[in-house]
Amino acid sequence: YKFCSPSRAAFLTGRVPGHGIWEINPGDATEVGVNLKATMLPAMLKRAGYKTHQIGKWHQGFYAPPFTPRGRGFDSSFGFLMGGADHFNQCHACVTAIPPPDYTNHSQTCPASTYGCNVTCPEQGGVDLFRDDGPAFGENGTYSSYLWSKEAQRIIDENHGTNPMFMYLALHNVHE
């Protein structure tokens, strides 16, 4: 599909965009999420005895607990909830505030989310990095793909093949 959020929703629900799930990317800080009547794959697999893990980009709704990864059936979650974040400091929408090609100055204003507005990121907030049900304080500042791969490796190592497992690893660097 041509937009990332509906594509992710289609994978996670088994539904085609426009048939119970949205067809466009939702705006950040809006009160939307994938329809709660659409059961997501991790919830079904969890019922079948799987351990379920979400790592990386979510972008399926976050304004209320039922819309978050844990609310949709994941046992664990580590990543960012909105549609985009800086790859190096996990500031939401900071990259868009830095004129290309210089993406090295990462203390820019994060303008795109209501709780990250008018702050210098990451010094004053605006970081979109969450572990399970809350902010992942102190875990930002590493290239995001390294964070995601390290988390995936940790989960695999801890599983020891003892339980069936579903891991949803949604890398962000495929965007640019």
Image: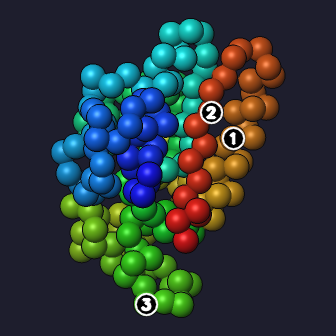
* Residue displayed at 53% across by 90% down: 102
Can you tell which quarter of the image residue 50 is in? top right
Please provide percent x and percent y for residue 169. Answer: 60, 43
Secondary structure under tag 2 reads strand
How far apart marks 3 and 2 lie (CA) works out to 35 Å
- Front residue of this view, candidates 164 and 129: 164
Residue 109 showing in the rendered view? yes
Q: Earlier in the sequence, mark 1 or mark 3?
A: 3
Disc 1: which residue: 152
> To which residue does mark 2 refer?
167
Q: Assign a secondary structure to mark 1.
A: helix
* Tag of residue 99: 3
Q: CA distance from mark 1 to mark 2?
A: 8 Å
Q: Amino acid at mark 2?
A: Met
Q: Is residue 26 left or right of residue 131?
A: left
Residue 1: % across, % down: 44, 51
Could you tell me the amino acid type at mark 3? Pro
Position of 148 compared to 122: left or right?
right
Quick check: marks 1 and 2 in contact, CB under 8 Å?
Answer: yes
Answer above or below: position of 120 versus 8.
below
Q: Residues within 10 Å of mark 1 (few under 14, many from 20)?
A: many
Residue 21 appears in which quarter of the rendering? top left
On the rendered image, what quadrant is the C terminus found in?
bottom right
Q: Residue furthest top?
A: 48
